Amino acid sequence: MSLPPVLGMGPCKEYNETCVGNTQRGLLYLGVALTAIGRGGLTVSVPCLHDEQTSQGGQFKLCGLVQKHGSTAQNLCVYAIGLVIISLISSWTFRFGFPAIFAAFVTVTFLGGWSSYTKTGPKDEGSLLSTLFKAFTPCRNHQENEGGRKESSFMRHITGISINFIILGIVSALGNTFFVSQANYMKRKFLFMTIPLAVFQLPMLIALAAAPCICAMCAFLQCANKYCNFCVPRCLRTIPSIVGVAVAMAHAILCCVVAAAVVKRKHAMWLVFQFYLVACVDVFFRSSIEAYYHAQAPSTLRDYHDVYTDFVTGVGYFSSVVLVAIVGRVSEGEGKGKKSWFGETVGESRLDRYYWLLAVLGTLSLAGFWVMVPFCIGRVDKSPANDDNDSNRLRHQSSCCFGRY
């Protein structure tokens, strides 16, 4: 956390622990804040930009679910190459400088094609905040009653079931916290070399590579119904996303069980399985929520699946901090002479107990999800503007599984 040599003065022109002061801490937190702002801007802007460039009139098509993830392999290759390069570099100047130079190059390249981009004006539906405000408040006139009723119904149902998804964010937070600490603490010798910590991110890349396949599976029934005149009941179009969310929760439980089982192992290669499973949690959850939004959400809310997923996952990240604090305080007060589950190092901690606790919480969340599914999923009417010519006939034929739609 010392000042970069280019900004250093006097004896602090090198990375030295004694040179850490308020200036260095301020730069660190400023970098964290800028990273959060950049990530938030990309999350909101990139999907909208993609829809404008790949569809007519700015209206997203159902089969765009597959097209949207078509460049995933290319992105993963760039990420993997950068990961390997950074892991082989020991100098922090180049570790931070290389991504900065690459980001600057990408920014200049993006701005270079500005004149060729398709640009559309603001949507008639308004911003996300105005849409959510209208969804949670009663309609004041008869003309807006139908659309407002569907938005309010969808928001009530998705909010009610979201409590079960917080555990997914808590488990996802393990990948960059306790799992990395375990890998750094365990032996990483393999043959004649030491495995860099960044290599343990590769199983996560493998899981991310499966995202297009999952999205294609979830979007198949939707595309068939819209473009092939193949009548698929509403409940059948929703089932893949429901099963996908359940699979994500099952992966979260399995990840905690595997992590608890290998916590006493000596070699870091045992952590490959849990790194892969924790990536599958995010992949299945994000892909399933995207498919569910396109199958069930009203047109005004359909493009906000990424915002919803990031919000729920973010709540899980914050909840993990609170949960660790509570568990640490409770475990420390179990009895006289008892130590907290979270020690100064991984060797002094009882992470296996914490993982078992998360597995139990995940099981309870999965059970609660299946209990709430018949009441919260599949009871929202699609917007009339997005129904096909046979929407009335389809609505009467879609009365299975979870009641009439």
Image: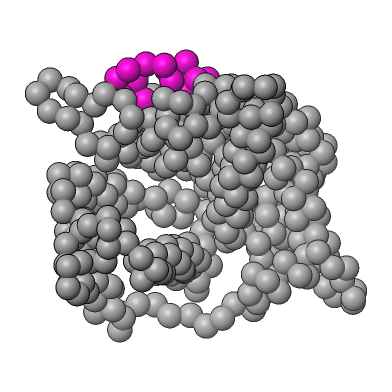
- Would residue 346 be visible to someone looking at this image? yes
Image point 90% across, 77% down: which residue?
141
Q: Is residue 125 above or below residue 222?
A: below
Q: Is residue 18 left or right of residue 62?
A: left
Left or right, 94 with reference to 276: left
Residue 254's spot in the image, x, y percent?
52, 22
Q: Is residue 360 above or below residue 245?
A: above
**Can residue 214 be seen in the rendering of this structure?**
no
| Quarter of the view holding residue 131 | bottom right
Magenta stretch contains residue 265 = yes
Furthest-left residue in this view? 192
Can you give x and y, in whole percent of width and height, for residue 301 in the image? 65, 62
Residue 360, above or below 345: above
Name the dominant secondary structure of the magenta segment.
helix
Residue at point 28% right, 78% down? 111
Q: Which residue range is magenta in the image?
A: 253-271
Placement of the N terminus among the 4 image quadrants = bottom left
| Number of numbered tags placed on the structure image | 0
Which sits in the foreground, 19 or 162? 19
Position of residue 27 in the picture relative to residue 302 (left or right): left
Q: Nearer the viewer, residue 192 or 134?
A: 192
**Residue found 61% across the figure and 34% down from its top:** 328
Of residues 123 and 195, the one nearer the viewer is 195
The percent position of residue 280, horizontal first and vertical second, equals 46, 34
Q: From this view, report whether residue 20 is shown above or below residue 121.
A: above
Q: Residue at x 46, y 55 (%)?
A: 64
Inspect the magenta stretch and tell me whether residue 200 lies in it: no
Instruction: Give the percent coordinates (x, y) of residue 317.
Output: 56, 47
Q: Dividing the image into 4 quarters, which one contains the C terminus?
A: top right
